[in-house]
């Protein structure tokens, strides 16, 4: 990996956040013009079409950011790091359990069951594919944000990436879903950042765990 300052990695983190923000343009500007209706009035096929287009945009953004980072800075961020110890896995398990409890209380039951009942099989499947791509970009915010702030402050035990995800992706939900949801997303982002550190900065381990916390 080439030696470089933290600002280069912060830019990549913000590009990942900008990728998430593309959905706002699709959902609140372009698609309402196309469908002649706000999101709340879309039909099931229109919702599914929105998720497909959003996933395509997010997938291209993720691929482009990762490809650029590997080409410019090497594969260091994407290689397996140190092996997590037993206490680290225990801490991850505790965070996952806490996330499940919070989700159960927030949704007054199982989020998965409630979304399946609300959406039906087709919408449910496409929405959860959509969650896969969203979780990927959130993880990129965490990965590059962590690298940026570690290079500035030389401390590897603070979840800088989670903090950055909280103040970008998390705060954005205050405007799209309200204050209660925004607080919940911010806390989740901090937890995701902790998971990334606890699994030894190994994105192969971090991604499925974060995705489970995200959807369950």
Image (cartoon, grey):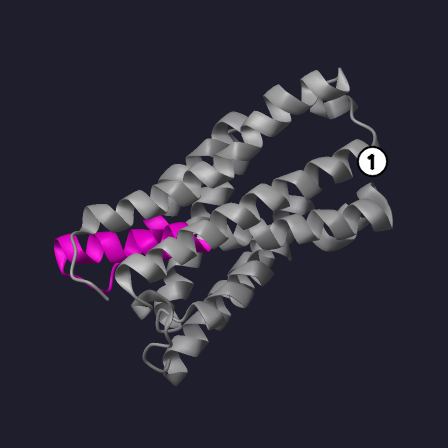
Residue at (48, 51) in percent of width and height: 62
On the question of residue 191 being in view, the answer is no
Q: What's the magenta region? A: 139-164
Q: Is residue 140 magenta?
A: yes
Residue 170: quadrant of the picture: top left
Residue 68: quadrant of the picture: bottom left
> Total label count?
1
On the question of residue 46 being in view, the answer is yes
In the displayed structure, 21 sits above or below 131; it is above
Image location of residue 11, percent across then percent down: 29, 43
Q: Helix, strand or loop at disc 1?
A: helix
Image location of residue 135, percent across then percent down: 53, 53
**Towards the viewer: 52 or 96:** 52
Q: Which residue is mark 1?
A: 45
**Towards the viewer: 169 or 55:** 55
Q: Is residue 206 magenta?
A: no
User: Magenta-highlighted stretch: main secondary structure?
Assistant: helix
**Towards the viewer: 121 or 52:** 52
In the displayed structure, 142 sits above or below 175; it is below
Image location of residue 60, percent across then percent down: 53, 48
């Amino acid at each position: 990996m080439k030696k470089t300052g933290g600002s280069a990695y912060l830019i990549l983190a913000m590009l990942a956040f900008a990728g998430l923000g593309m959905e706002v343009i699709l959902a609140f500007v372009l698609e309402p013009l196309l469908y002649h209706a706000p999101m709340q009035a879309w039909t099931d096929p229109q919702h599914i079409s929105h998720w497909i287009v959003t996933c395509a945009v997010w997938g291209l953004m993720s691929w482009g950011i990762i490809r650029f980072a590997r080409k410019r800075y090497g594969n260091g961020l994407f290689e397996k790091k140190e092996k997590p110890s037993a206490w680290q896995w225990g801490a991850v398990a505790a965070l996952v359990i806490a996330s499940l409890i919070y989700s159960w209380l927030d949704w007054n039951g199982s989020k998965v069951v409630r979304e399946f009942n609300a959406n039906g099989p087709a919408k449910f499947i496409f929405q959860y594919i959509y969650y896969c791509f969203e979780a990927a970009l959130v993880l990129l915010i965490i990965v590059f944000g962590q690298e940026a702030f570690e290079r500035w402050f030389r401390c590897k035990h603070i979840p800088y990436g989670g903090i950055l995800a909280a103040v970008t992706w998390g705060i954005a939900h205050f405007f799209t879903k309200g204050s209660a949801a925004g607080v919940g997303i911010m806390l989740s982002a901090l937890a995701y950042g902790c998971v990334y550190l606890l699994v030894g900065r190994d994105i192969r381990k971090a991604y499925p765990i974060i995705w489970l916390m995200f959807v369950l």
